[in-house]
Image: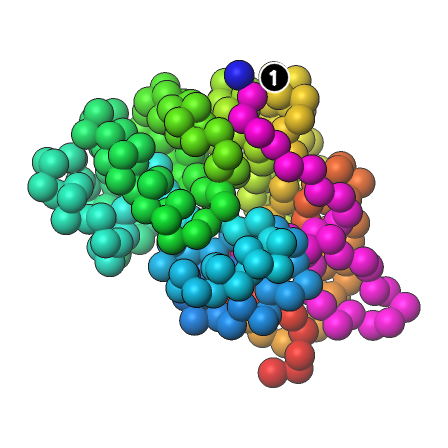
Amino acid sequence: MYCSLIWLTGLGCFIENLPAQETVKTSGFVICYHPNISSREFAPYDVVVVDYAYPPESIKKLRQQGKLVFGYLSLGKIHKERPFLPAVQSARIGLQQDVQWKDSFRVDAADQNWHRLVLESIIPEMKTIGFSGVFLDDLDDLKTRNLQDQGISLIRQICESNPEFKLMANRGLEYADRFSPFVDYLLLESCFLKSGSKRDSTDSDWALQLFLSAKKENPKLKGVALDYISETKIPLTTDQKRIVLETSSLHKQHGLLSCVSFRDLQSVPSINGK
C-alpha cells in the first residue's frame, strides 16, 4: 500500500544571496526548528519542516499560502518540554536519558503504549494543530537499539490510519527499503558534507544506493537532502559559498530536493553579512 504522495520539482533550499553570477534557482525546501521564526521568512519555500511547538496560527498562514508543512516527531526520543511527556510517564513507557542530548530521553519504541499514544493522541493532535504532514526523526537511533521492526510497524500504522497525512522519514537508510512504501519522502541527512567539507564520494554513494533501493520498493518516493555548512548561523566565506553551491548542485544531479543549512537548524538559511 502506498500513501498519497506529492510531487515537487527543482533544487530545493540553499543559502541565499550568493554572487549574482552564481545564483541557482530554488524550489523551496527548508527545515527550521526555531518556534519564533516569522512565517514570512518561509515565503520562498514550498515544503517547510518546523518543530512540533511552532505556533498554530503561523502554520495556518503557511498552509493558506499552499505550503506543505511538516511537524517534527521523533519515533525514538522525547524532549523534556514536549506536552505529551506526562502521558508517556503515566503509561510507564520506558525512558532513558539520551547521552547525546541532555534535555531528551530515549523512548522504548517497542512498548505498545508508545504506539497507541502516537496513533491515538500525538498524530491526531498534530492534525488538529494544522500540520499537513509529520517529519519522522531518529530512525537511525531505532536501528542502533535494534528496534527497527517496531519502528517500521509504527510508520505503517501512521500511514494507513492517516492516508491524507504526508510522511517524511529521516535516516534509517539501512532499512529504508522496508518502510519506504509507507512514506512520501526520505531525507538523506549529512550524506554529502561533513563538518562543512565535502565527504568522500564513497560515503555519498552508499547513501544514494540505499535511497535507490528504497525507491525500488516505492517508485513514487521523493528524495530530500540536508547538509550542513557550519554548526550555527555565521557569515560565510567565499569558499563556504562555493561549497554550498556545489553541494546544492550535487543534490540536484541526483534528483534530490536540497537544503544546505546550519546544524542547529535555528534559522532560515541566508547570507546577510550579520
Q: Which sits in the foreground, 152 or 68?
A: 68
Residue at (45, 28) in percent of width and height: 159
On whether residue 137 falls in the magenta region, the answer is: no
Q: Tell whether 102 sits left or right of 129.
A: left
Read off the residue under disc 1: 217
- Name the residue furthest right: 21
Q: Tell whether 150 sits left or right of 49.
A: left
Element under disc 1: helix
Q: Is residue 176 visible?
A: no
Residue at (57, 58) in percent of width and height: 64
Q: Which sits in the foreground, 246 or 12?
A: 12
- Name the residue furthest front: 64
Residue at (47, 56) in percent of width and height: 50
Q: Main secondary structure of the magenta part?
A: loop
- The three-letter code of the residue at mark 1 reads Glu
On whether residue 8 falls in the magenta region, the answer is: yes
For the C terminus, give its image quadrant. Answer: bottom right
Counting from the top left corner in percent of width and height, residue 78 is at 27, 47
Q: Tell whether 31 sits left or right of 113.
A: right
Quadrant of the rendered structure where residue 106 is? top left
Q: Is residue 218 visible?
A: yes
Quadrant of the rendered structure where residue 54 is? bottom left
Q: Which residues are magenta?
A: 2-31
Counting from the top left corner in percent of width and height, residue 109 is at 27, 30
Up the image or down, 244 lies above or below 93; here it is below
Counting from the top left corner in percent of width and height, residue 244 is at 72, 59
Up the image or down, 11 lies above or below 38; here it is above
Q: Tell whether 248 sits left or right of 178.
A: right
